Amino acid sequence: MTSRKTDAGIKDVHANAKVLSEALPYMRRFAGESFVIKYGGHAMGEEHLAQLFARDVVLLKQVGINPIVVHGGGPQINSMLKRLAVQSNFIDGLRVTDQETVDVVEMVLSGSINKQLVTAINGQGGFAIGLSGKDGNLIKARKLKRTKKDIDTNVEQIIDLGFVGEPSEINPHILDFFAESDIIPVIAPIGVGEKGETFNINADTAAGAVAGAVGAARMLMLTDVAGVLDKDGKLISELTLGEARKLIKDGTISGGMIPKVETCMQAVEGGVEAAVIVDGRVEHAILLEIFTEKGAGTLIKRG
């Protein structure tokens, strides 16, 4: 008669039990809390990672956490614009979003991407419902204003980006309702203006605004980097708001990481307990961050 478990198998079981034991205090601590997860980047584009993400979101709901997913979709938007032969103009790297372009953006974000993610979560045993910021006036928006200094005259000039917006008001009522149910909301970052116009909102910005409005315990930003790195390229596991400001000032935090860190800082200043930048390319990155002592990314807190 053969043994039910090999020595290697027993070690694996013990390792799994240790992981579950380590996770239990965090499950208790965060039960009933809301977590806003910004989903995008490489994790969204790879089917295997997308399915693991969906499973992890369902697990959060099962252990009593209220996950709220806000997703991006830049590459998919670019692909559709190209397919439809819609020309995109850029000013200093920012897309000018005219009426034709914003119609495509809304179609892709609120349509195909949103429903793919909803389907993935439901396929893993969850109960997800897709929304855009228009639904229930969830995300009211205003036109995003950007300026550029003229090199010759040194005068600030207003840049017109068209239907690019920023949140002006979040209505969390519908999300409060979902928190008391089995529903997992999946939000496309489309906002509605005062006159009913459609605004395309940066997904990071939308996630931060939603997290602040619901008083989330965590905002998790899934990116294509490990988190904030020091000048030696090593991951910084935790930062206070003051420390983050210093790293921006001295150039340690630079380039595309600056707006992500600033969004996290704004969320914390707006009432979120802590915000985390985490590598979405790592399998189960969300669970590693939430349910282990070391975490998996860079956590930013008030201090």
Image: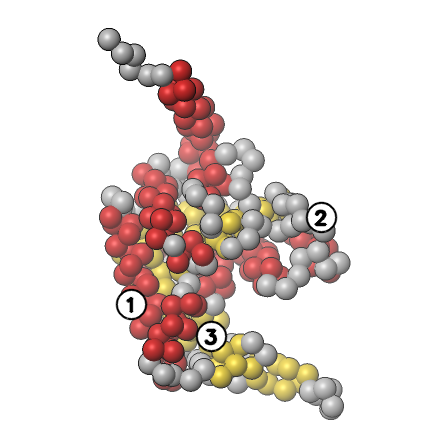
User: Where does the image place residue 167, in percent across and percent down from the top left?
Assistant: 46, 69
Looking at numbered disc 3 in the image, what kind of residue is underneath it? Gly
User: Where does the image place residue 68, in percent across and percent down from the top left?
Assistant: 38, 52
Task: Report the mark closest to the observer, 1 or 2.
Answer: 2
Residue 40 visible, this angle:
yes
Helix, strand, or loop for circle 2? loop
Residue at image location 63% in from the left, 64% down from the top = 255
Residue annotated with mark 3:
165
Residue annotated with mark 2:
232
Crowding around mark 3 (Cα neighbors within 10 Å: few <14, some 14 to 19, many 20+) is: many
Quarter that holds the C terminus? top right
Q: Are marks 1 and 3 in contact (CB under 8 Å)?
A: no
Q: Position of 192 compared to 122: left or right?
A: right
Task: Report the mark closest to the observer, 3 or 2.
Answer: 2
Task: Report the mark closest to the observer, 1 or 3.
Answer: 1
Q: Residue furthest bottom?
A: 153
